Image: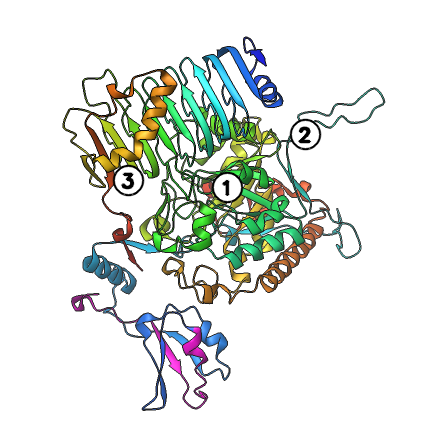
Amino acid sequence: MASDFFIYPEYEVVRDQDRCNLCKVCVRQCANGVHEYIAETHKLVSDEAKCVNCQRCVVYCPTRALKIVKSSNTYKENAHWSGATINELYRQAATGGVLLSSMGNPQKYPSYFDRILINASQVTNPSIDPLREPMETRVFLGPKPQRIERDSSGRIIPRLGPHLKLTMPMMFAAMSYGSISYSTHESLARAAETLGIMYNTGEGGLHENLYRYGKNTIVQVASGRFGVHPDYLAAGAAIEIKIGQGAKPGIGGHLPGAKIVGDVARTRMIPEGSDAISPAPHHDIYSIEDLRQLVFSLKEATNYQKPIIVKIAAVHNVAAIASGIARSGAEIIAIDGFRGGTGAAPTRIRDHVGIPIELALASVDQRLRAEGIRDRVSLVISGGIRSSADIVKALALGADCVYIGTAALLALGCHLCRSCHTGKCNWGIATQVPELVKRLNPEKGAEHLVNLLTAWQHEIKEMMGGMGINSIESLIGNRLMLRGIGLTEKELAILGIKHAGE
Amino acid sequence: MHLSAENLPFRELNERVKAAPGEVQIDNCYGQPFVGSGCKDKSIIIYGTPGNALGAYLDGAEIVVHGNAQDAVGDTMNDGRIVIHGHAGDALGYAMRGGKIYVRGNAGYRTGIHMKQYQEKRPVIVVGGKVGSFLGEYLAGGLIVVLGLGVEEIPVGSFTGTGMHGGRIYIRTKQKLSGLPPQVTAEIASDAEMGEIMPFLAEFAGLFDLDLKQFAFDQYYVLKPNAKSPYKKLYTAH
């Protein structure tokens, strides 16, 4: 950074010298090189300019001598030009570069999940206690039959196409090997197997060691087709065509050559050091008819054994697009809202493109029902799911299932420092540096993921029980269980819910 | 085994092709898509016009078309060989990683885009005539050769090699190549560079019964990416 554009460090490392015993754990734990031991003065010092506030040193300091606080250095107060805005401008003036950042949109946009409340039964239609009565959280993703057919002895003739069967309405969202580490992928795969759900390879191929988790794997096909070959397609339980991503709608993926090393290169099947570019457009898809062709070419290549998912970002005319996808032959539509995470995205795109998933979901569900084609597809939504309450609200707004990305990474130790694009994740998640990758133990990681989702599953059962509902199927699209709070008529109309008190 | 594709829906045709061992000959092919998709070890000979996505994800099989092919031939092909005696449509060899495609006639827009190579896998496309615009966009690996046989003008369209960051494109023309994007450098191919494609030119000549001397020793341009990582200077961390 040119000195003309000095930017004061965003954070301060506060070291309590009375507590610090000079053990130097902080030096060893920080891949950004913030901490340094000065032998002459027998002191630990910090270069805060390198700190991303990932909290690794704070967590690992055995004497609790460290904390990271927001710097109090301020520009002259200005309601229009915030310090962050000014700093971003300086960075660009100094480098001429596109601002790059990671994880989901952190800006102050309304969260509709926080303005929706859930119903419970009182007196009539009594609530159900999940501790003493069976509660069904199992979901099936795929088309539902239009009618039931029976044979001459009255038995139902099953005519179901390929489906995904999940023990609970949650799956791990697509995150590619390359953007995240091998340990992270293995943690997700193990947890998915234990839980009876799915994880998603993202567009970076499937590591050969993880083929054995195939029946809990969704394999992704994106425009760059990295690591895509017939055995890969056959390995998963479903195939997802990635059209878009909530964090960067209209923008493709670009894993820089520096991250294409060793097994990442092998799994993507490209040479080490080569850029992995997945442009936003699939240059063989310019219409729903073209999409249908890709859907069916994948079905043909896998003998119609796998459901096909089409993943799009939540954008302005998402309902019309989803209607097209529902007619493309795909069994499942995944919609990713603007809070969705990413390993790297241009900041302006992440923060300004796309729409909230709650509105996108509600409008897609309404549109598909209005057109009488809702049963042809299942809806999976993602982009900012933080808790079981968000999931219950999403299901009642019409989702069949949710993808969990950021929340899963938090369970693995992520502290949301939003610096994935630097490749130096101290928690061993968004990095390919071997010493960092091994910090995440896949066995432990899987255990934490299983803990989180099991807890959420139980909370979902309790909320369902409160509503007097004992099956997820009765919750999906059940908008009567929701009320808005502090929402306008228009917002309520789009969400298809009443206001609290109505 | 002989199959008549007349009045056969594509799904049924493809099921029968997959079920048949060894060599299959399809007669009267009328635009059925996805023929041979994902096939590993068989030989499919087609008379007529197969539909889109012929040989998608092909993984070792051989397909010969006596006629024209349509769009998306060899999409994400991993291994094998596709020989087309007529013309091919758009997006030929999209994201192809291995194997070879030989087209005697012309190919459409977006030929060989996203092709990549990996270790021993190095995909090859040879087009006898000319191709449309966007040839080899985002090219990350492999070889594309455009022969321009019987074509006086430059045998490629606009935007050739945009976003190219690996691989090679060879273009046979007496004209001076111009208007290429900044990611690409173009030079007259040296003898050593010609040596790299000679086996494929010989295979092409053999497949289509042509005289190698009529086209293999003319002036070829070779297009290469001018930086291995063209995008890395684009961003500033934040």
Q: Left or right: A132 with respect to A321?
A: right
For the residues labelled 3 and 1, the Cα–Cα distance comes to 23 Å
List x then y, in percent, for residue B233.
25, 53
User: Residue at position x 25%, y 39% from top?
Assistant: B224
Question: Which residue is at the front of the view, A380 or B57?
Answer: B57
Q: Magenta stretch containing residue A296, yes or no?
A: no
- The amino acid on which the numbered mark 1 sits, given as a three-letter code, is Gln
- Sequence order check, earlier mark of 1 and 2: 2
Pointers 1 and 2 within a single chain: yes
Q: Magenta stretch containing residue A23, yes or no?
A: yes
Q: Nearer the viewer, mark 3 or mark 2?
A: 3
List x then y, in percent, for residue B120.
42, 41
The residue under label 3 is: B163
Label 3 chain ID: B
The residue under label 2 is: A160
Q: Left or right: A296 with respect to A465?
A: left
User: Residue at position x 41%, y 21% from top?
Assistant: B83
For the residues labelled 1 and 2, the Cα–Cα distance comes to 23 Å
Bounds of the magenta segment:
A1-29
Q: Relative to A371, does residue A356 appear above or below in the rendering?
A: below
Q: Secondary structure at mark 3?
A: loop
